[in-house]
Amino acid sequence: MKSGKKIAVVTGALGGIGTAIVDSFLSNGVVVIATIRPGSSQRATDWKKKRFDNNEHLHLLEVDVADHSSCEKLIAQVKEQFGRLDILVNNAGITRDSSIKKMSFEQWNEVINTNLTGCFNMCKLAFTLMQSNGYGRIINISSVNGQKGQFGQVNYAASKSGIYGLTKSLALEGARKGITVNSISPGYIRTEMTSKIAPKILDTIISEIPVGRMGEPEEVAETVLFLASEKSAFITGSNLAMNGGQHLY
Ligand code: CAA
Ligand code: NAP
């Protein structure tokens, strides 16, 4: 497919923040490849119809970001079907919260493999494709808890703070090639992910957010849209914190 529109891959597109990012990209003339996990094609087809009225600029492709060969297959499909890639949003992510004494190696590995290695897998392949076109915007979704840490999240916080080192280093590699690489660190956002937190714990967390509320997925999507635009060309290797004042540094 040839088009003057920008081509974006959004991982974890079916989730709360992913859906808002897809929506904002489509509303701003971006062609979106929404990635879905293998086996979720029926759910994804329903989502595309219900949420986006089968928008012709929205495409669904499968990927398990934790599996490098699955990422290779995805990027090969993008290259074949769209010819290039302008924007990558590494949004797929999971939590497996537990205090360290109870945390299994499986809980550690799952989170590191999805959130950090998944980000590496997608960056490595997308960067090569973007480089061939001399342009790119990579946005990695980290977290306030990657910045400040959180009780019960040694796995998640490690994966999300690992994203900062990856982002800054890759920004240096992309700087002369027209590719910017940045991260966004949202605070607590109203999605499926935060709905798993015990209500009492969540109430305590919200009481510690100076603006007095959780964030909305659409607020994250607005920030992604800005970093994904051509106008953000001088911003690279940075992290944009958006947490309602919960963590200031
Ligand atoms: N600070 C200090 N001590 C704490 C604590 C805290 N925040 N929370 C629990 N404790 C203490 C308890 O008082 C208890 O102490 P005693 O043993 O002396 O009685 C002990 O720790 C309980 O330890 P357990 O291992 O039994 O913990 P648990 O099973 O009760 O709960 C947990 C563990 C499920 C991880 C729970 O602490 C929790 O839900 N924490 C919040 C995690 C969180 O914020 N997750 C965010 C998910 S969404 C997300 O991550 C998105 C994003 O990027 C923001
Ligand atoms: P969500 O609703 O649970 O969405 C997460 C998405 O990631 C889902 O679509 C999920 O697929 C997908 N995913 C999980 N593992 C994957 C894998 N191995 N390969 C491909 N896709 C995978 O969570 P969210 O709140 O929107 O979170 C999106 C991102 O923001 C995550 O990186 C999260 O860590 C980060 N974040 C969230 C918050 C918050 O408060 N919500 C705050 C800071 C940062 P399925 O739909 O198939 O499960």
Image (cartoon, rainbow, N blue to C red):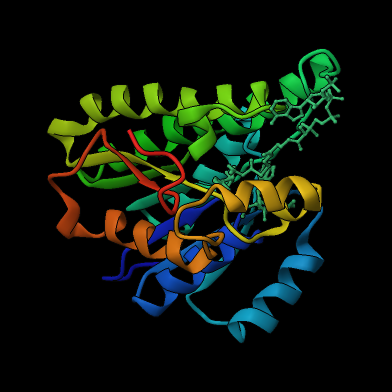
Q: Quadrant of residue 49?
A: bottom right
Q: Nearer the viewer, residue 17 or 92?
A: 17
Q: Position of residue 22 (x, y in %)?
A: 50, 67
* Location of residue 141 with respect to 221 vertically, above or below: above
Q: Quadrant of the C terminus?
A: top left
Report if residue 80 is visible in the image: no
Q: Position of residue 42 (x, y in %)?
A: 81, 67
Q: Please report the residue visible at 63 percent of the width from the left and 46 percent of the height from the top.
A: 205
Q: Please report the residue visible at 57 percent of the width from the left and 45 percent of the height from the top.
A: 74
Q: Quadrant of the N terminus?
A: bottom left
Q: Nearer the viewer, residue 68 or 244?
A: 244
Q: Position of residue 161 (x, y in %)?
A: 48, 25
Q: Quadrant of residue 189?
A: bottom right
Q: Nearer the viewer, residue 196 or 175?
A: 196
Which quarter of the rendered image does ligand 1 occupy? top right
* Location of residue 248 with respect to 101 vertically, above or below: below
Q: Is residue 96 left or right of residue 184?
A: right
Q: Position of residue 135 (x, y in %)?
A: 22, 47
